[in-house]
Image (cartoon, rainbow, N blue to C red):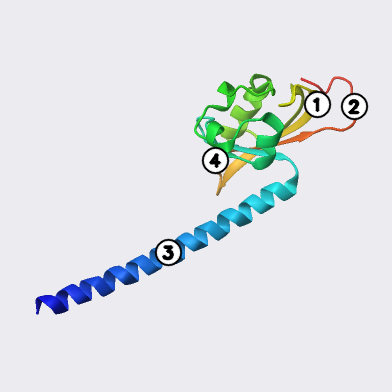
Amino acid sequence: MMNEELESTNDELQAVNEEARRRAAGVDEAHLFLQSVLSGLGSAVIVVDPDRKVTLWSKVAEEMWGLRSAEASGEALEGLDIGLPVGEFLPSICRVLAGESEREQATLKATNRRGRNIVCAVTAGPLGSDGKVEGAILLIEEQDGAPAPGAIL
């Protein structure tokens, strides 16, 4: 009787383990898909939570600012030592996080990880659905041409 119960429990555990493996594989696939989409954008993508802590730091952001995802994740965006003057754009990010704005844009002078002065177009939009803002998505793109006069913060 005890052997039958142990075998039954073992079968159940094996089924649970298999389901966990299947789900983990699905999560891995979704993660790879997301990374592919983000890389394909060509823009640095940074996602912050309502407290402005980094939850996603794309490969392009790593390349642009010289900070690995593991170093940026969980850190306050404005506390990161990158060449982007985040403080100048912070009020815009706060408006998005407060649900006061659907999109904020600015052109900022910055210094990339190689020490070269660049001009970046920065766009912030809300992360969330059904009107509930759960964070902000920042897209940062290096500009090739000269920006319009007065456009740089």
From the image, tell me which residue sits under label 1.
Answer: 119
* Crowd tier of the residue under label 1, counting other residues whose Cα lies within 10 Å: few below 14, some 14–19, many 20 or above: many
Q: Nearer the viewer, mark 3 or mark 4?
A: 3
From the image, tell me which residue sits under label 4.
Answer: 133
**Three-letter code, disc 1:** Val
The mark nearer the N terminus, 1 or 3, is 3
Residue at the image point whose x is 27% and y is 72% from the top: 12
Per the image, label 1 sits on a secondary structure element best described as: strand
The answer to whether residue 16 is above or below residue 42 is: below
Per the image, label 2 sits on a secondary structure element best described as: loop
Q: Nearer the viewer, mark 2 or mark 3?
A: 3
Q: Is residue 92 left or right of residue 72?
A: right
The mark nearer the N terminus, 4 or 1, is 1
Residue 133 lies in what quarter of the image? top right
The answer to whether residue 24 is above or below residue 99 is: below
Q: Nearer the viewer, mark 4 or mark 1?
A: 1
Give residue 21's mark. Answer: 3
Q: Are marks 2 and 1 in contact (CB under 8 Å)?
A: yes
The mark nearer the N terminus, 2 or 3, is 3
**Three-letter code, disc 3:** Arg
**Three-letter code, disc 2:** Ala
* Crowd tier of the residue under label 2, counting other residues whose Cα lies within 10 Å: few below 14, some 14–19, many 20 or above: few
From the image, tell me which residue sits under label 2.
Answer: 146
Residue 62 lies in what quarter of the image? top right
Gap between marks 2 and 3, in whole Å? 51 Å
Q: Are marks 2 and 3 in contact (CB under 8 Å)?
A: no
Gap between marks 4 and 1, in whole Å? 29 Å
Q: Nearer the viewer, mark 1 or mark 3?
A: 3
Instruction: Return the x and y of residue 112 as percentages of the image width and height.
Output: 74, 26
Residue at the image point whose x is 39% and y is 63% from the top: 20
Residue 142 lies in what quarter of the image? top right
Gap between marks 4 and 2, in whole Å? 34 Å
